[in-house]
Amino acid sequence: MPFPFKPHHWRNAVALVAVLALIAASGNWAEQRELQAKTEALRQAADAHVLGLRGLVERYDLLPHAAARHPDVRGLLHASGDTALRARVNGYFAELQNTTGAAALFLVNRTGLTLAASNWDAPTSFVGQSYRRRPYVEDALQGRRGVFYGLGLTTGQSGLFIAEPVRAGREVLGVVVIKISLEPLQASWRRGATPVVLRDGRGIVFLSSVPAWLFRSVRALSAADLQWVAAHGQYGRRERFDALPWTMQAADGMGGFTLRTQVAAHDTDFLALDTLLPELGWTLTVTEDLREVRQARRLALALAALAAALLLLAVLYWRLRERRYAEQRSARLELERRVEERTRDLQEAHAFRKAMEDSLLVGMRARDPQGKIIYVNPALCAMVGYGAEELLGRYPPYPYWHPDDLEKQARDSDNALRGRAAPHGFESRIRHKDGHDVITMVYTAPLIDAGGVHRGWMSSVVDITAQKHAEARQRDQEVRLQRSARLASAGEMASTLAHELNQPLMALSNFAVAARALAERGVPGMLTGALDDIVEQSRRASEIVKRVRAMINPQRGDHERLAVGEVLRHAGCLLKPELERHAMTLRLVLRDAQAQVRGDRVLLEQVLVNLIHNAMHAMQDQPRHRRRIVVDSAPDAHGIRVAVSDLGPGIPPDQVDQVFAPFFTTRPDGLGLGLNICRTIVEAHGGTLTVDNRPGGGATFSFTLPTVP
């Protein structure tokens, strides 16, 4: 005979289903929220990687174009047998390679034969090698610019090849090719925490932070694709490109996909995002670990289950009290029977409540008004490592109190026993019996018996150690994202400077070298000296651009031992004509002129020049007797401190915290990047840059640098 469902049974069933649905919804909400945060972090990481790739290509964008217009290059294509001309072109290419940092430069005639190369004197010289089957050579010989990534036919080393036709009018005489190595970029990816992958238009991985994924494909290659790759020798002699060990699934509404694979012999789930680089035909894939997403879901489910369990306990307690009042109003004749029923119900309820409390993941502790422990559940015993027999009957201090927080825990316990515990709970660090620390949240409520008498205090103890660790990781991630955003901004600035200055300066250097060669053949010597000065100045400007861009990657900076006094004096000499033109007085105070630092001379001089320029601008409206700038260097606890002081109006108090922010400026013609660049340079040298207003008027910009013995 089936059990008949009464109306309240249906209500209980519906309530249970609703509670379970709310618990599941809270877990889904937490998971979606964490996924959104991960997706945003992926987009920012992808933007930073794309910016770095495009900046690397743009750095060498016009180099083959400029080299193709060199008179000696064109002359060698007309007279390939001229050994003296070939030697000059070899030297010219070697000089360009050393100046720009390219992997190689070489010149190919219309038959695909290499006539000159920057590595002409190396065992793996390109001279005499044929590159006719390379697609970038084919494109350039047809008058188009060729771009191609692959393994070198001669060296076997990978690189990005950019080819430019050498023309005489409309006729293509040959091809100038530059090879760029992407190995430093791949090495930086391998130092990261999550995989980064770059693949070509056919889906073949050619750059990866996971070495096992190199030269594998996201899909099976067609016979035509395999034939093309083999015919052009794009990846050496490889004939097979196995599928990547990836299991991919689209992530609904996130713009990415989930990726399951093995990393370091462990199955790992990632959230991945693809970014297309259409100008290169590549696809960049960045990833984020999904473990924190699943941990957020589990934590939300646990907290929701705890809330539901506490609500159920409160409902059960209320129902028991209502039943007791109803029994007292019953007739005298049924008192004995009702007492028996009540006793049985209480026993069942007690057994049910105890079973529920024992199954809870939340620790429960009851104390009498004097602080003696009168009840603990298994969850609390597991949390502190002590058995119930070791805790029951104990007065403060309890054995699990942390030895470093005894005073705080005694104060919190006394507040709870006096009814002054915070209603939203308080955080407490305890010591597990085996010695490790556990961070908890403690919620305390009065313990009232069936007669309404206050019998003590009931505390719920929640282990939030994992949550605290997750919050710490989140804070660390936010700091890294802020630094990535700041580096991305500096990278954009450096790329802009390189695009605006490096191209015309490189063209100037090439034509100046050609003019010097013509002068040596018969033009008077004074022209040669003047052209030498032009070449030297263009190289210095190009060096400044290269070092400013090196701020994005400080490991590439040209650091050396420097005397601080020499750097300050040279910066003053650079500005001497401008100081005299504006009737400014510059005073150098060198308290330790022999102090040695390790750094980049050009960048440190740029910091001083920028700070002195700002001081000059601040005092342009001051009378002549107040146009004084003092540069003071003195030892301090962090090494050497350099201060640039002026007698201008100073910095308004509401703008002191903004002066180093990118694009903040008070000058109508300013970009707001100078002080931000100065701070980036100083921090790359291990120092700090600060600003203070002087009591008598004016401002002082100070930076510290660590000294070397």
Image (cartoon, rainbow, N blue to C red):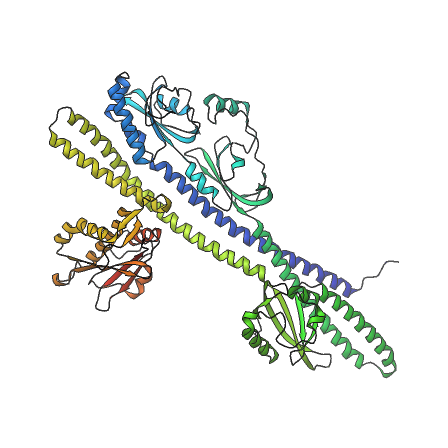
> Is residue 176 visible to us here?
no
Q: Quadrant of the N terminus?
A: bottom right
Picture coordinates of residue 399, whole percent (x, y): 63, 71
Q: Residue 699 sits in which quadrant?
A: bottom left
Q: Residue furthest bottom?
A: 332
Is residue 502 found left or right of 188 in the rendered image?
A: left
Picture coordinates of residue 338, whole percent (x, y): 84, 77
Q: Is residue 432 above or below residue 189?
A: below
Nearest to the observer: residue 190 or residue 69: 190
* Residue occupying image coordinates x 23% and y 24%: 71
Is residue 243 found left or right of 138 in the rendered image?
A: right
Picture coordinates of residue 481, whole percent (x, y): 44, 52
Picture coordinates of residue 552, whole percent (x, y): 36, 46
Give the number of marks.
0
Q: Is residue 127 above or below residue 412?
A: above
> Is residue 289 visible to us here?
yes
* Residue occupying image coordinates x 20% and y 32%: 512
Q: Residue 459 sits in which quadrant?
A: bottom right
* Residue occupying image coordinates x 54% and y 74%: 408
Q: Residue 159 sits in which quadrant?
A: top left
* Residue occupying image coordinates x 88% and y 82%: 333
